[in-house]
Image: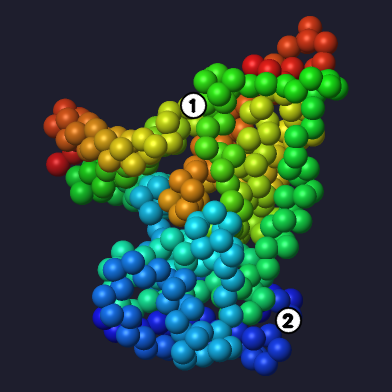
Amino acid sequence: MIYKFLIFRFDPQKDSAPYEQEYILDLGEAEKTTVLDALFKIQQTLDKTLSFRYSCRLAMCGSCALVINGREGLACKTLLKDLGTNVITLRPLKHIPVVKDLIVDLKSLIKKLREMEPYFIPKTPSLEPAQIKPDSRERRLIGLHTECIACGSCVSACTMMYWAPNYLGPMNLNRAFCLIADSRNWSEKKIEQIAGEDGIYRCHMEFNCTEVCPKHISPTRGIHYLKRRLLWEKIKSLNPWRKNKKYASEVD
Amino acid sequence: MNGGDELILKREIKDLQVWRSTFLGMWAWLLQRISAILIIVFLTLHFLLPYRRPIQFLLLLLLVIHASLGIRVMLIDLGANVKTQKFLFIVLLLLGLFFLVWIWNRLPLGG
């Protein structure tokens, strides 16, 4: 089968503006050919200057996330036959700075994530390893949310990233959810961060992030847990007889 | 271009491909916002031109759509499983439309 690829091209060293380049490729049956395979073929046979990023090729690292025919997805996981057309448009992820062609600079996302202290901070110092049983309610609540591969697809699909570039975004809020829902974690500062202007209330529940996540995570679910949690914390803080009026204990 | 030296692609509504990644959840959000604006328009028309059945019907229809989608948002906010969001969108809209037909036949409306 002959495929027509319309690929976003932009080299900040040479180009004054981005443009779309057309490549025609005969890929035969292409039953198991992925978008990443096609990109390799284009680079090896048609255009050596085409830049794209990849690493594991197993949908584990998130490096090859692209906007494929208008929808975010991993190039290594997306089969050409599943796209239902032989005209394929490839663009870099939205709301993230473009480095070259299909490569985006994830630094801005990582910077925001780092500001949030996205790591475990124990509530009480202990030399013993704290445990949460796999079948406990708490672990089931966090579920697969820890499986995020930070590919940036959710950030690209989120319309609020367009209107509020400082919004923490679904990826970072998903991380915050994993930590705040963990009763062993000291979450007070994180709760304050997510309650701010660029925090959870920017989410308008459009579910775009949920739809495009290659790991089938729903950041919207996590964000809504955080909204409920914050509301509950605020209600508890209204109690005049509480010792710590600011926030209640971490464990519900 | 952003700041002259950094290119950031955005989700521009004039780009037709953007609508391919507009899923049911986002249509629900858009529909609720659009219905909110139209409610203001039809409410004004209703005050200026009272007892006009087409205006009354359209105003009720918009209210039903807006309320149904609002109930969906509240249910999810209160902890309904997010996996049911598409189901809730369809079911609550259908229930709203049934309610509209039911109430339309019972309201003392103008001629």
Mark 2 surroundings: few (<14), some (14-19) or many (≥20) residues within 10 A: few
Does the rendering let one see residue B108? Answer: no
Q: Nearer the viewer, residue A188 or A3?
A: A3
Badge 2 element = loop
Chain under callout 2: B
- Of the 4 image quadrants, the one containing the C terminus of chain A is top right
The front one of B71 and B55 is B71
Does A139 appear above or below B57? above
Q: Report if the CB atoms under discs 2 and 1 are less than 8 Å apart.
A: no
Residue B37: image x %, image y %? 43, 51
- Relative to A129, does residue B6 appear above or below in the rendering? below
Q: Residue at x 64, y 57 (%)?
A: A164
Q: Are marks 2 and 1 on the same chain?
A: yes
Question: The residue under label 2 is which amino acid type?
Answer: Gly
Distance in Å between CA atoms under marks 2 and 1 = 44 Å
Q: How is the image coloured?
A: rainbow
Residue A53 seen in this snapshot:
yes
The residue under the point 50% across, 86% down is: A44
Image position, residue A240 (x, y; %): 78, 10
**Rendered residue at 50%/43% (across/down):** A217
Asked where in the image residue A239 lies, by quadrant, the reply is: top right
Secondary structure beneath label 1: loop
Question: Which of pointers 2 and 1 lies earlier in the amino acid sequence?
Answer: 2
Number of residues whose C-alpha sits closer than 10 Å to that of mark 1, classed few (under 14), some (14–19) or many (20 or more): few
Tell me the chain of label 1.
B
Q: Is residue B109 above or below residue A52?
A: above
Give coordinates of residue A211: x percent, y percent: 43, 51
Per the image, the residue denoted by label 2 is B4
Q: Which numbered tag is attached to residue B78?
A: 1
